[in-house]
Image (cartoon, grey):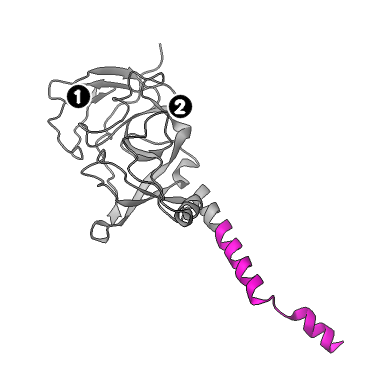
Amino acid sequence: MTSKAHREKRSLPIWQESILLVVIATVMAVVVKTFFIQAFYIPSESMQPTMLVDDKIIVQKVSLWTGEPERGDIVVFADPGGWLGVEQANSASNPVQKGLEAIGLFPTGDHLIKRVIGVGGDRVVCCDGSGRITVNGKAIDEPYVLDPTVVRNREFDVVVKEGYLWVMGDNRDNSADSVAHLGDPGGGQVRVDSVVGKSWVRVWPLNRAGGTGSTDAFDDVPAAPPES
């Protein structure tokens, strides 16, 4: 009896324990990526000076459990259709990296990152006499923009549909954003449900690690007018 009990209490062989630990770690990584945080890198110059090419960032998904992105948020979102290409500079280059990317342990670049300028119901207009975008009639001073003197060649006056966002890069002169895709079937607007998460922290390079640019530029924007 003693010998039998001893055999039943023996731990798993090392190789089985190793496989079990790998499986558990993989499942945990997938859960974290799906519901909590995910790593991305910046593939283009479109968010300069806030983010530079190849910056590694973490986006958080928790705030989307109970709410939607707000004006001023920097969001990562899935390609609405044909927006990548010039924006996507790199991707995982080998099977190991691709596998790590799939479970959230390698930063991915197959999404876009922009700043939310307008949410559902907002009227976004470019521009006032000083070259500033207005949201619901309120001119926005945007200190994070690379060159505040840059005014888009194409003027626009849009009302954001409910369930959508109007997004723009901080590098207004070099960003494939809502303005650049104004003539597309979707009118350049991004579905809220395509948003993966909000930019949270920069983890690389270490000398610029930290928060990724919260702003109070939109604090005084009035609520969107009711639909007529």
Place of residue 204 in the rendered image (x, y in percent of width and height, measured from the top left): 30, 57
Quadrant location of the C terminus in the rendered image: top left
- Which callout, 1 or 2, points at the residue further toward the start of the chain? 1
Left or right of residue 216, residue 83 in this image: right
Q: Residue at x 22, y 33 (%)?
A: 174
Place of residue 227 in the rendered image (x, y in percent of width and height, measured from the top left): 41, 15
Q: Residue at x 40, y 40 (%)?
A: 111
Q: Does the segment drawn in magenta span residue 66?
A: no
Place of residue 171 in the rendered image (x, y in percent of width and height, measured from the top left): 22, 36
Q: Does the segment drawn in magenta span residue 25?
A: yes
Range of residues picked out in magenta = 1-27
Which residue is label 1 attached to?
Answer: 152
Left or right of residue 147, residue 100 in this image: right
Q: Residues within 10 Å of mark 1 (few under 14, many from 20)?
A: some
- As helix, strand or loop, the secondary structure at mark 2 comes to loop
From the image, give the main secondary structure of the stretch colored magenta. helix
Q: Residue furthest front?
A: 94
Nearest-to-viewer mark from 1 and 2: 1
Q: Residues within 10 Å of mark 2 (few under 14, many from 20)?
A: some
* Residue nearer the viewer, 34 or 112: 112
Which residue is label 2 attached to?
Answer: 163
